[in-house]
Image (tube, coloured by chain):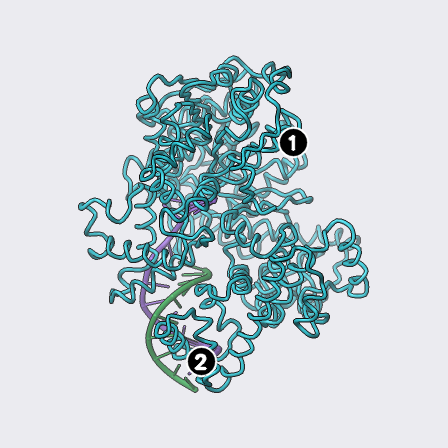
Chain colours: A cyan, B purple, C green
Amino acid sequence: MTGFDESDAFEAAVPLSRRAMAARPAPYLDDLNPAQRAAVEALDGPVLMLAGAGTGKTKALTARIAHLLTTARARPNEILAVTFTNKAAREMKERVGRLLGEAVEGMPWMGTFHSISVKILRRHAELVGLKSNFTILDTDDQIRLMKQLIVAANIDEKRWPARMLAGLIDGWKNRALTPQKVPNSEAAAFNHRGTELYEQYQERLKTLNAVDFGDLLLHVLTIFQAHPDVLAQYQRWLRYILVDEYQDTNVAQYLWLRLLAQAHHNICCVGDDDQSIYGWRGAEVGNILRFEKDFPGAKVIRLEQNYRSTPHILAAASGVISANAGRLGKTLWTEVEDGHKVRLIGHWDGEEEARWIGEEVERLQKGTRDFKRMSLNDMAILVRASHQMRAFEDRFLTIGLPYRVIGGPRFYERLEVRDAMAYFRLAVNPDDNLAFERVVNTPKRGLGEKGMQEIYQTARAGRLSLFDAARLMTVRGEFKGKAANAVRSFLDAIDRWNEVASSRRRSAAADVTDVRRIVPGSDEAFTAFEPEETVDAGSASDEQALSDAPASDYDHVRLAELILDESGYAAIWQQDKTPEAPGRLENLKSLIEGLEEFDNLQGFLEHVALIMDNDSVDAVEKVSIMTLHAAKGLEFPAVFLPGWEDGLFPSQRSMDESGLKGLEEERRLAYVGITRAEKLCTISFAANRRVYGQWQSALPSRFIDELPADHVEVLTPPGLYGGGFGAAGMAAGFGGGSTIEQKAMKADVYNSPGWKRMQARGADRPMAQPQEARNMVIDATAVSSFVLDDRVFHQKFGYGTVVGIEGDKLDVAFDKAGVKKIVARFVVSAAQADDVPF
DNA sequence: AAGGCGATGTTTTTT
DNA sequence: ACATCGCCTT
C-alpha cells in the first residue's frame, strides 16, 4: 500500500449499505458525557467543538464519524476528515474502525491537509501547469534550489541566506499569497528581491514538475478559485467536513476549508485555543477565535470535563493560562478528588537538575510512599528547546537509565537516508537533477567544482538533464583522470538500476532472475547488509519469499540493497570509523526494511515525501524525553518540566520577535506541558545554566509566579549532592521566603562563597567513598568483562579506552568525547564494533 | 580534489 | 559547546 490509493476516492465505491448501517444500534453514544454527546449529535451545520486538554476530544470526533455513517447522513467517501499529522489520521482511522467493525474500508478522505491535497492535485495538476506525476520536494531540496537562484541573481548569499528566503516564501504560502498577491508593504523583503525570487522559484518548480509542501495547499486553492466547476464537484462530494486541531490551521488551510464548506456548511472544527502553539509556523489562533463569525449560526460546544489529570494539576494549568487575554474561555473540571500537588523545585545548575530528575525517575520506578511503582514508559521529561535534552541524555547514559528521545532529527531527514533516497530516485528517474546533483560525487568520484560546472554547461547548452549531459560528456571523453571511469560506471549503474526499476513497475510479477541477469554477480553484491549469520540467510530469505512477503516485494528491496552496495555508498559508512557511522548503517538498514511494505521503489518514494514520521514501538521500557511541542496530544502519569527560567521558558527570542503574542504562545506551551500530566507534575528551574558554552544565571520563569500557591508543593533542593553536608548548609538558609520561587530556591545561599566552595570540592571527588564501598559488593556479583586499556566503542561517544573500572561502571577516555563514566553494558569492545557494523 | 581550519550562528516542527 | 559552512591549504 502506498498511502496514495486514489482509485477508491474517485470511483464512488460504497462498501457499505445505507440500510445495514442505519439498522445498527449506536452503543458508542452511551459512552459519552452530555457535552460529548451534544457534539456528536449536532451533525448538520457548522459546529465548533472546544475541547480542552484531556476531555475526550478524539473520542467525540470518532463517535461523530460513526454517527454520520450510522444515521446514513453520509457514506464513508463523503466525509472529509482532516488532521495535521499522519499519526493523528491513523489513530482516527483505527478508532472509527473499532467503533464500527470493518465498515470503514473506504474513508478515502481521511488524512492530513497535505495528503488530501496531493490526492486532489494529482487529479487536476494540468490546471496549474503541472503533470500529474509531479514530485514533492523536501526542505533540503528547496533550499538548494533557492541557493542556486540567489547566486544566479547575484545576491550575496552570506547576507541573504537561502534559509531566510525559504522562510519568507513559506510564510507567504502559509498565508495563501502567490507572488502576485504579496502586498507591497512586504516588497522590501530579502533585499527588495523577495517577490522576484519567489516568482523565479515557482517558475523553476514548474519546469522541474515539482512542488513544495506549501504548494500542495496553494495549488489546490488556486484550482478551486479559478475553476468553480471543479470546486462544485468536491463540494457535492464531501458533504461533511471534520477538522482536528483547528487552532493550528493557517490562512491557506482556512481558505481551503471555507471553500469546501461554503456550499453545505457541514463543518465541524475541533480545537482548543489554549493549545495553539504553532503560531511561529503560520498557524492563526484567529481562525478558531473567529469561527462563529466565519460560519454564522455555528453551534459552539465546550468539552470541559477532564479525564486525565488530578484537580491540582488542572488548577495549576488553569492558573497559568488565565493570564492570557482574548481566550474563548473554558474551565476544566474533574470528578477526581484527591491527588498530588504540582511539585516545584529549584536547582543550582542544569546538571544538578538533570541529576535530580534522574534520581526521581528511579525513585518513581521503584515506588515511593506516595506513588506505587511506575513504568519508565509512564514518565516523560518535556523541555522547551531540544538542546536541553542533552543534559538528560548525558546523565541517563551514565547512570544507565533507558530513555527515548521523541522527535529530534527526523529519520527521513538524516544525511544518509537522504543520500540513499537520492540514489533510489535516480534509479526510478535518471533525469531527477536534484538527486543527481546530490550523489554524483558521493562517494567521491573525482568530480570537483570544475567538473560539475561543465556538466551544468553541457546540460544547459543541449537542454539535457544532468544525467544525459554527463553521459554525453563521457562519450566525448571530456572527464579527466579518476572522474572518467568513476562517472562512467556511475551512469552505467543508474542505467541498470533504472532498467530493473522500470521493469518492476511494468510487471509486478517480475522475478528475481531479472536482477541476476542484468547485474552479474549480484548474488554477492549486497554484503553491507547481510546479517552476520550468513549461513542461515539463504534459507531465511527463501522462507520469507514463500511465506509472508509476496515474491514481487523481494525484488525492489533487493534492488535497493544492490544500489547502495554497487554505488559504493554503503561502503562509505562501513569504512567510516566515526561514532556516527554504525548508527548511519543502522538507519540504512531500517530504510531497506521499510521498503518491504511497498510494491515498488516509486511507491515508496511517494510515500516518504509526505509521511515523515517514525514512531518506532519499543519493547524496552524507557523514559521519554521530548520537546513540549512534540508532547502535544500525549499524556503521561508523571511529567517533568525542567528549565522554567525566564529567557529559556518563556523563550527570549519568542518574546523579542513576537512580543505579547509570543509570550502568550509560550504561556500556552506551559499550559500544554502541565496538562500532559495525569498524576504527578514536577516543575523545576536552575539558577545557572551553560548556554552556548557560557555560564549564565537566570531568574525563575514568570510562569512560576502564575502557579496558584495552593496547588503547589515546594520541594527542598536536593542537598544529597556532595555527600550530605550540602543539605545542612542549605537548611540554614531556609525558612522566610515569601514568593514561591524564593522558597524553592534561596538564591543567596546558592550564591554564597561557601556553597560554591562546597560545589568545587564535591566536583573534585564526587562521592568517592560511598562509591568504592558499593563497588566492592557489586564486583563480587557483576564482573565487567573489560580490563584497563581495553579499546571500546559506545553508540553515542564513539571509540575510547578504558581508564578505570568500578563494578559495572567504566571510566572511558573517549577519543572525541572526553572521559565519561559509562555503564559497561552500553559499550562493546572496539574489535567487536569493527567486525559488526551494527 | 579533498581534507583541515577558522568564522559563524544557533527555538519550537509538520507536511 | 558545538556543529556547520566556506575558504584555504596541500
Does A175 sit left or right of A363 as displayed?
left
Q: Residue at x 37, y 25 (%)?
A: A263
Marks 2/1: CA distance?
Answer: 73 Å
Residue that appears at 56% across and 43% down: A5
x and y percentages locating residue A349 in the rendered image? 46, 47
Which residue occupies the foreground of this view, A583 or A649? A583
Residue denoted by label 2 = A473
Q: Is residue A512 visible?
A: yes
Task: Pick the residue in front: A19 or A394.
Answer: A19
User: Label 1's element?
Assistant: loop
Left or right for A150, reference A527: left
Residue A510: x percent and y percent?
68, 59
The numbered mark, 2 or 1, whose residue comes first in the sequence reads 1
Q: Is residue A216 above or below residue A158?
A: above
Name the foreground residue: A357 vs A287.
A287
Image location of residue A181, percent across then percent down: 24, 44
Disc 2 vs disc 1: Cβ atoms closer than 8 Å? Answer: no
Residue A301 in percent (x, y) is at 43, 17
**Crowd around label 1: few <14 · some 14–19 · many ≥20 (10 Å):** few
The residue to which callout 1 is attached is A368
Q: Chain of mark 1?
A: A
- What amino acid does circle 1 point to? Thr
Q: Do pointers 2 and 1 mark residues of a single chain?
A: yes
Q: Residue at x 43, y 58 (%)?
A: A140
Mark count: 2
Taking the image as shown, residue A813 lies to the left or right of residue A285, namely right
Image side of residue A165 versus residue B14, left or right = left
Q: Identify the mark at residue A466; answer none if there is no mark.
A: none
Using the image, determine if residue A821 lies above or below residue A176: below
Q: Around disc 2, counting alpha carbons within 10 Å, would you say few (fewer than 14), some (14 to 19), or many (20 or more)?
A: some
